[in-house]
Image: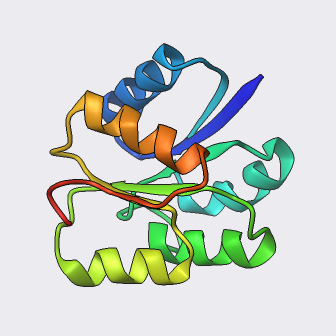
């Protein structure tokens, strides 16, 4: 059983990501819309991958959450999915332990490729930010 957590406050975007994950065989998918709920859910579920937005309601943003999660469990695989394209976001995300960085301009095909690369132990940066 492949498990995933989607951290995204916009329902439409979260639903699209959920459909993408279902298409590639994920069967247990949790959607979390508020940063303050993420850490406890990750510890409970222990997902194979986390798709993380940066801008979230709550005490931490997605990069801060990623750092906190990786500090607790360095085997977690986090892919940042965001509107931000500035190189500083990419550098900070990878620095704190994210395994991938995708923009919301990425195609579904590229998102699937990125997820596959990350699950196989590689780091993936989408074309827009490479």
What is the x, y in percent for residue 81? Answer: 35, 52
Relative height, residue 84 to residue 44 (above, below)? below
4 with respect to 125 (left or right): right
102 with respect to 42 (left or right): left
What is the x, y in percent for residue 2? Answer: 71, 28
Quarter of the image where the C terminus is located: bottom left
Seen from the viewer's position, the closer of residues 123 and 98 is 123
Among the 4 quarters of the image, the one containing residue 12: top left
Relative height, residue 88 to residue 120 (above, below)? below
- The scheme the figure's colours follow is rainbow
What is the x, y in percent for residue 55? Answer: 35, 63
Is residue 61 visible in the rendered image? The answer is: no
> Looking at the image, which residue is at 59% across and 17% down?
25
Relative height, residue 22 to residue 79 (above, below)? above
Is residue 98 visible in the rendered image? The answer is: yes
Quarter of the image where the N terminus is located: top right
What is the x, y in percent for residue 9? Answer: 41, 46
112 with respect to 102 (left or right): right
Among the 4 quarters of the image, the one containing residue 124: bottom left
> Looking at the image, which residue is at 28% across and 37% down?
110
């Amino acid at each position: 059983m492949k498990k995933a957590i989607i951290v995204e406050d916009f329902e439409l975007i979260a639903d699209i990501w959920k459909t993408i994950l279902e298409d590639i065989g994920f069967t247990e998918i949790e959607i979390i819309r508020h940063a303050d709920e993420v850490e406890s859910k990750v510890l409970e579920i222990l997902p194979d991958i986390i798709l993380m937005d940066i801008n979230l309601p709550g005490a931490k943003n997605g990069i801060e959450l990623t750092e906190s999660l990786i500090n607790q469990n360095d085997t977690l695989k986090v892919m940042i999915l965001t509107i931000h394209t500035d190189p500083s976001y990419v550098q900070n995300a990878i620095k704190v332990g994210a395994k991938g960085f995708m923009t919301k301009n990425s195609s579904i095909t590229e998102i699937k490729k990125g997820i596959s690369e990350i699950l196989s132990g590689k780091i993936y940066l989408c074309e827009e930010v490479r």
